[in-house]
Amino acid sequence: TLRILSCYLPATGGEVTLGGADVFKDSLTVRSKVGYLPENVPLYPDMRIKEYLRFRGALKGLHGARLRERIGVVLEQCELTEQRGAVIGRLSKGFRQRVGLADCLLHEPECLILDEPTIGLDPNQIRHIRDLIRGLAKQHTVLISTHILPEVEMLCERVLIMNAGRIVASDTPKALVGLMKGNENVVIEVHGSRRAVLETFEAIPGVESLTCEPMGEWSRLVCQCHNAEDVRPDMFKVVCENDWQVRELTTERRNLEDVFVAITKGEFDSNVEKAEADHA
């Protein structure tokens, strides 16, 4: 799909438009509007960064003072100014990703299409690329394809989930997580007689089931609650009444990973389709 959007691959059918231009009939216009960063960035390892950007800019129709200006801007945006003379083949993967992004930005595209932009990077590199994408989103439409769903929750204002080639969910991350059916679990770590703890918590109204993980003298209990009832106040009350010690009492929050698994396994609430229809 990304290759079709960026004019690298022709589709066998259907229609695709980007920024009002038809990908098949007016591909040059579409290319001028798009910056595409594939998962494996295709770079020339024997070139220096500045040489590569000069070459790529010329291919995109930039020349003279305008090309020099844009190279300076993207080197600064991607924090490559000090490395501009470095040979690309000697760069780490993180720096190669930055070079690929700099190439994407040279012609000031309206839309950036990024395929797994943080895969294979170390935590420091991921943070830098994440911050860079946030900054780019202020001036560009940024379309990210990734299976790293925590990244999506931190970066994206809107999520599209595809399954078997079709869009099966489309909304904000918060709204999609809110449509998850099933109840949040309550987690508590408590110090007390394990048998007494289990019997007492099982008797609390709203607790459907309990699992207990021994942790030395402590017990970690995961409680599934009926109809999303918040049983934490009742739990805290019985803890105080029995003079037990507590070092954690919280809920396990749903996230996009839960949503993705539920959708692809066909377990997602039918409210998704209704929400999409309402939004449309």
Image (cartoon, rainbow, N blue to C red):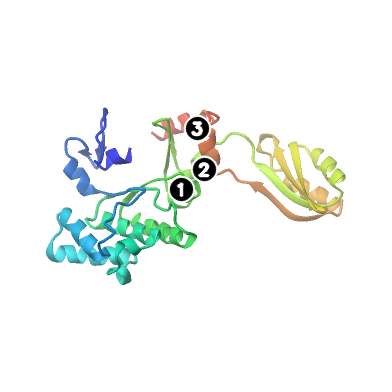
Percent across and percent down for residue 166 are 39, 31
- Front residue of 73/228: it is 73
Camera-side mark, 2 or 3: 3
Q: Residue 107 falls in which quadrant of the image? A: bottom left
* Residue at the spot of label 3: 264
Tell me whether circle 1 and circle 3 mark residues in contact (CB < 8 Å): no
Camera-side mark, 1 or 3: 3
Whichever of callouts 1 and 3 sits on the residue coming sooner in the sequence is 1
Mark 2 neighbour class, 10 Å CA radius: few under 14, some 14 to 19, many 20 or more: many
Percent across and percent down for residue 142 are 34, 49
The answer to whether residue 178 is seen in the rendering is no
Q: Quadrant of the N terminus?
A: top left
The three-letter amino acid code for the residue at tag 1 is Val
Percent across and percent down for residue 39 are 36, 48
The three-letter amino acid code for the residue at tag 2 is Leu
Percent across and percent down for residue 212 are 76, 43
Is 189 above or below relative to 169? below
Residue at position x 58%, y 34% in the image: 181
Tell me whether circle 2 and circle 1 mark residues in contact (CB < 8 Å): yes
* Residue at the spot of label 1: 152
Q: Could you tell me how many numbered marks the image carries?
A: 3
> Residue extending furthest bottom?
82
- Front residue of 54/265: it is 54
Q: Residue 130 falls in which quadrant of the image? A: bottom left
* Element assignment for label 3: helix
Is 90 above or below relative to 258? below
Whichever of callouts 2 and 3 sits on the residue coming sooner in the sequence is 2
Residue at position x 51%, y 30% in the image: 271
Whole-Å distance between the Cαs marked 2 and 1? Answer: 8 Å
**Side of 139 where 278 appears, left or right:** right
Whole-Å distance between the Cαs marked 1 and 3? Answer: 17 Å
* Residue at the spot of label 2: 256
